[in-house]
Image (cartoon, grey):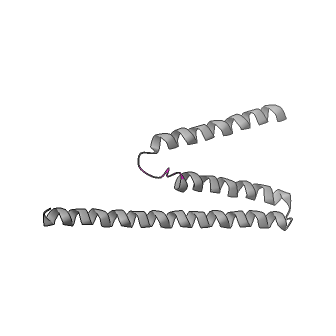
Amino acid sequence: MTERTESTSRYKIDIRKKEYKEEMVHQVTSFTLMILFTFIAFGMVVMEISSYFVKPVLLLLAVIQVVFQLYYFMHMKNKGHAMPAMMMFGGIVIAIVTILTFTSIIWW
């Protein structure tokens, strides 16, 4: 190999290592936040705080954890995942609209 190709391949390896390191930092950070959210949820339930406050906060923490799961652990942020992400989020929107529709039909 010539010195130029060695230099180029070494540069690509260094970039890839940097990307992997950044990816690992994001993974560990999101995992730590999810564990923290879980402790907060358990703490609120154990402390027997009013259910009018606990239920919405638990739902919010659950939604945040689902987003973390999809975005970081299922790699939906990476290139090439636009169509699966669009289909998944489209399905979620349709499910939410369906639930709201049937709930409103039953209650009114």
Q: In the depicted view, which residue is nearer to us: 23 or 88?
A: 23
Would you say the magenta stretch is mainly helix, strand or loop? loop
> Residue 93's spot in the image, x, y percent?
62, 40
Residue plotted at (74% across, 59% down): 57
Residue at 63% in and 52% down: 66
Which quadrant of the structure image shows residue 30? bottom right
Q: Name which quarter of the figure residue 17 lies in.
A: bottom left
Residue 13 in view, yes or no: yes
Q: How many marks?
A: 0
Residue lying furthest left: 2
> For the point 56% across and 51% down, which residue is it?
70
Instruction: Tell me if residue 91 comes above or below residue 41 in the rendering.
Output: above
The residue that appears at 66% across and 37% down in the rendered structure is: 95
Q: Quadrant of the image for the N terminus?
A: bottom left
Image position, residue 108 (x, y; %): 83, 33
Q: Position of residue 84 (x, y in %)?
A: 50, 41
> Please, is residue 75 above or below residue 40 in the view?
above
**Quick check: is 50 in the magenta stretch?**
no
Q: Which quadrant of the figure has residue 11?
A: bottom left
16, 48: nearer the viewer: 16
Is residue 108 shown to the viewer in this render? no
> What is the x, y in percent for residue 41?
75, 62
Q: Is residue 62 above or below residue 35?
A: above
Q: Which residues are magenta?
A: 74-79
In this view, the residue farthest toward the front is 1
